[in-house]
Image (cartoon, rainbow, N blue to C red):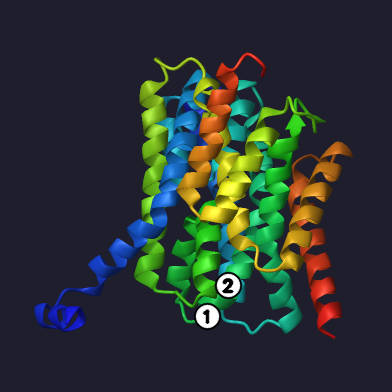
Amino acid sequence: MDQTLIFATIVGMALVTYIPRAVPLLALASRNLPPVVVRWLGYVPTAVLSAMLAPCLLLEDGAVNLGVDNLFLLAAIPTFLTAIFTRSFFGSVAMGMGLVALGRYLPIM
Amino acid sequence: MVTRARAVLKIPAIPVALSGAVKQALPIVLGYVPVGFAFGVLALKNGISPVNAVLMSVIVFAGSAQLIAVGLIGAGAAPLSVIATTFVVNLRHVLMAASLAPFLSSWRKRSLAWFGMQLTDETFAVHSVRFHRDERDRAETFGINAIAQLGWVGGSWLGVAASTVISDVRPLGLDYALPAMFIALVVAQVKDTTHVLVGLVAAVLSLTFLEVGVGQWNVILATVAGASLGTGVATWTRR
């Protein structure tokens, strides 16, 4: 692709990214939602983050790998523990990245 | 004493909001810089010009979609299919925006429109925790978003600048920045056992949907199913 076409693609990407972000805010902010809808929306953060996370950790080349040779899955255990016990965002990210980098230097991986 | 001194000296509210914003945005920035860096490196390696790469981080500002788009562009995909994929990948923000909307009823349309520009997975996660604690200061909210995006654009720019030196981002563990950030964010969301159940079910469903071949729709479908299950369980157990 030449750079002008890439530029046009980026503008299109910006539009289709912005619309889903802005429309619900503008349409729903001034409305009183029924309690059941509010409760449903309260579970969205947990659900959406888990749905994004699971494939990151469990899929290797498109197939589920639950084995100990799955470095991303293995590193997730201390990362989860760090997040649960320290509540430190940065500490968790540093732990995860450090372990993955370390794992790649070890011959067993 | 401090409050009185502030009133006497007429220190405006903006710097106060800014210091709070810096503190809360810092973890996002620390997560964004390495992922943005990886994006910058990969963008140039896939034939995107430095200007277009940085521009994408400024006007799209969507980590996973940008990384996917870079791969598609590098593989020679048509512009329309890149845009369509971006749309599907980012459609999950409909649910995030909807879940934050009830907290922002006092905001003007203009503020809401601007807030939407910088609604990412990470800013969403931070604001959803803040808003539930009744922290809805507009200056602080926009401050957090601006600093977060600065980190994203800055990281992308660094990656663009370093792309000739770096041949592979894997040895640094940079490709784990995003999963690790998701782990920290999801742990911050869990309030009770129903949340744990919702998270596990959404995770399993997301993988199942991928395996049956729904493509990028897996996240949206798993989220709708997980949140519905949670609502059902919560309604049933409270009865």
Of residues B211 and A86, the one drawn nearer to the viewer in this rendering? A86
- Mark 2 highlights which residue? B101
Q: Residue B88: image x %, image y %? A: 70, 46
> Can I make out residue B36 in this image?
yes
User: Mark on residue A36?
Assistant: none
In the image: residue B170, left or right of residue B10: right
Under tag 2, what secondary structure? helix
Tell me which corner region of the image, top left, top right, bottom left or bottom right, holds residue A99: top right
Q: Residues within 10 Å of mark 1 (few under 14, many from 20)?
A: some
Q: What residue sits 65% from the left and 40% below the top?
A: A76
Q: Residue A104: image x %, image y %? A: 59, 20
The amino acid at mark 1 is Ser
- Mark 1 highlights which residue? B105
Q: Residue B64: image x %, image y %? A: 59, 40
In the image: residue B73, left or right of residue B110: right
Q: CA distance from mark 2 to mark 1?
A: 7 Å
Say yes or no: labels 2 and 1 on the same chain.
yes
Q: What residue sits 51% from the left and 42% below the top?
A: A93
Q: Residue B222: image x %, image y %? A: 79, 53
Q: Pinpoint the chain carrying mark 2.
A: B
Of residues A97 and A23, the one drawn nearer to the viewer in this rendering? A97
Tell me which corner region of the image, top left, top right, bottom left or bottom right, holds residue B230: bottom right
In the image: residue B121, left or right of residue A63: left
Q: What residue sits 69% from the left and 55% below the top?
A: A48
Q: Determine whether label 2 and label 1 are within 8 Å by CB.
A: yes
Q: What residue sits 47% from the left and 73% below the top?
A: B109
Q: Pinpoint the chain carrying mark 1.
A: B
Under tag 1, what secondary structure? loop
The amino acid at mark 2 is Ala
